[in-house]
């Protein structure tokens, strides 16, 4: 007896999280291509970014000096526009949204990394993401967990670093701790991916995890 075909995860919101160098973006593209071959509408997007306004704010955040509060306000302003103009409409029409980072990154980078007040971030999260159905969060978050020293080695020749990528290793250890805190607080939403393995091994992890969900 043949196995039942996997059901497409229509109308799902999935985020890919982790520090730069963890490989999340390439695996996001691979998942998107797999589901597109099955005839599913897939929206690939990123944060900060995803709309013309949010991309403009992204450029400011990545390349202009500012304090942590200004940074957080710009990121949440971009997120609000992104939700309204991209994510919510895509989900309403039944598309699957694959997002390269979302709010967990803000708590990891601005909260843990910068040491910014988590209570303020929680308030902004509620203001920006709360709607008629409650607080908008991804249905699933894949956390690509990797030692910052390994991530730094992978990024050496990859590209010109932005002002986040130029931070010291201690900063990225705090960011990793911030992701771990979110993971531990919301285990039902998160799946930890061991990003220290080869690309093929990570792909096998992801495929097995999606298959468990019937996706």
Image (tube, helix red, strand yellow):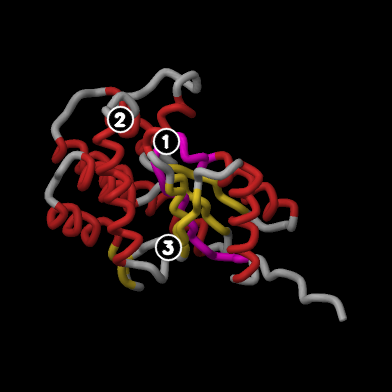
Q: Residues within 10 Å of mark 1 (few under 14, many from 20)?
A: some
Q: Position of residue 122 (x, y in %)?
A: 19, 58
Badge number at residue 190: 3
52 to 90, vertically: above or below: above
Q: Earlier in the sequence, mark 2 or mark 1?
A: 1
Q: Residue 214 appears in which quarter of the rendering?
A: bottom right
Q: Position of residue 79 (x, y in %)?
A: 33, 48
Marks 1 and 3, Cα distance to the nearest angstrom? Answer: 18 Å
Q: Residues within 10 Å of mark 3 (few under 14, many from 20)?
A: many
Q: Secondary structure at mark 1?
A: loop
Q: Position of residue 110 (x, y in %)?
A: 22, 42
Give the residue number, with chain letter if any, for mark 2.
164
Q: Is residue 15 magenta?
A: yes
Q: Give the extent of the magenta segment.
A: 9-25
Marks 2 and 1, Cα distance to the nearest angstrom? Answer: 9 Å
Residue for point 43% across, 48% down: 145
On screen, residue 180 versus residue 204, left or right, reads: left
Q: Residue 170 appears in which quarter of the rendering?
A: top left
Badge number at residue 20: 1
Q: Secondary structure at mark 3?
A: strand
């Amino acid at each position: 007896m043949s196995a039942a075909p996997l059901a497409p995860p229509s109308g799902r919101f999935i985020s890919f999280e982790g520090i730069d160098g963890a490989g999340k973006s390439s695996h996001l593209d691979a998942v998107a291509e797999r589901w597109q071959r099955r005839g599913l509408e897939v929206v690939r997007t990123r944060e900060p970014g995803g709309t013309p306004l949010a991309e403009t704010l992204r450029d400011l955040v990545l390349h202009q000096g500012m304090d942590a509060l200004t940074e957080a306000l710009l990121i949440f302003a971009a997120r609000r526009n992104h939700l309204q103009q991209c994510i919510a409409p895509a989900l309403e029409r039944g598309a699957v949204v694959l997002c390269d980072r979302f709010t967990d990154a803000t708590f990891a980078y601005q909260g843990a990394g910068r040491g910014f007040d988590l209570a303020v971030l929680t308030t902004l999260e509620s203001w920006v993401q709360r709607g008629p159905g409650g607080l908008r969060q991804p249905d699933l978050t894949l956390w690509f967990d990797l030692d910052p020293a390994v991530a730094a080695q992978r990024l050496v020749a990859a590209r010109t670093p932005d002002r986040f990528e130029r931070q010291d290793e201690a900063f990225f250890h705090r960011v990793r701790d911030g992701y771990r805190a979110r993971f531990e607080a919301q285990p039902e939403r998160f799946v930890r991916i061991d990003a220290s393995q080869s690309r093929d091994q990570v792909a096998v992890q992801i495929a097995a995890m999606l298959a468990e969900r019937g996706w």
